[in-house]
Amino acid sequence: MKKYLVYLIVCLAVFSGCSKPSRVEQYRSEKHVRDSVSLVEQQRSLAYYESQLDSLMPVADSLVALFRYEKNEKYQDHGNYAQTTPSGLRILVRDDGKELLLYRAGKRVEAGDIKISGKDQELYDRAVHMQIIIRDIKELEKRIARTSLEIQKYEKRLHKPAEP
């Protein structure tokens, strides 16, 4: 599509009676078109990422409300969303979504090593879902930040005064 836009611009310049542009002018024109297309693409991506984030936030809020947030500011970089099941299983989801930990009687256990059923299974499933949602939100936040920087870059290029 970019090639067609450049071709169209060159054809219009030739057929409108303008003299043939120099290579430098042609390169600048092509670069301007490429940057314009890239800017529109980045703006579309940003809108998509923001809409995805807007749809995930209510889900995350409803899940987070079921857990208690714990963090010791003195030595922890990340906090945990915690819940204890009726059978004494303690479920922790790290606030960046990178870990889901299970503890029973103060000892860490793996999900495959214990039998989980009933209410415990329901709470465990919620924790897994919350971990996925948190991880997705963090990824979208990173993409939004990167895309915003790309938009600023292309806007700066497109609004830069022409070089002599």
Image (tube, rainbow, N blue to C red):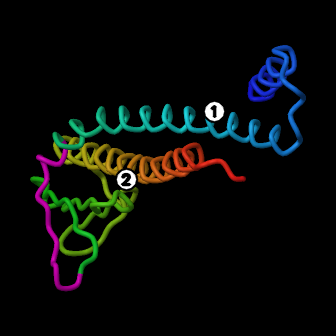
Element class at badge 1: helix
Amino acid, disc 2: Lys
Q: Which mark is residue 37?
A: 1
Q: Residue at coordinates 69% horizontally, 52% vertically from top-left?
A: 163
Element class at badge 2: helix
Check disc 2: other Cα within 10 Å, few if <14, some if 14-19, many if 20+.
some
Q: How far, Cα to Cα, is label 2 from label 1? A: 28 Å
100 to the left or right of 9:
left
Q: Measured from the top left, where is residue 68 in percent x and y?
A: 11, 58
- The residue where tag 2 is placed is 138
**Predominant secondary structure in magenta?**
loop
Q: Measured from the top left, where is residue 151 in percent x and y?
A: 50, 45
Q: Measured from the top left, where is residue 149 in percent x and y?
A: 48, 53
Residue sitting nearer the eye, 162 or 76: 162
Check disc 1: other Cα within 10 Å, few if <14, some if 14-19, many if 20+.
some
Q: Measured from the top left, where is residue 156 in percent x and y?
A: 53, 50
User: Taking 5 as reference, is 83 above or below it?
Assistant: below
Span highlighted in magenta in the image: 63-75
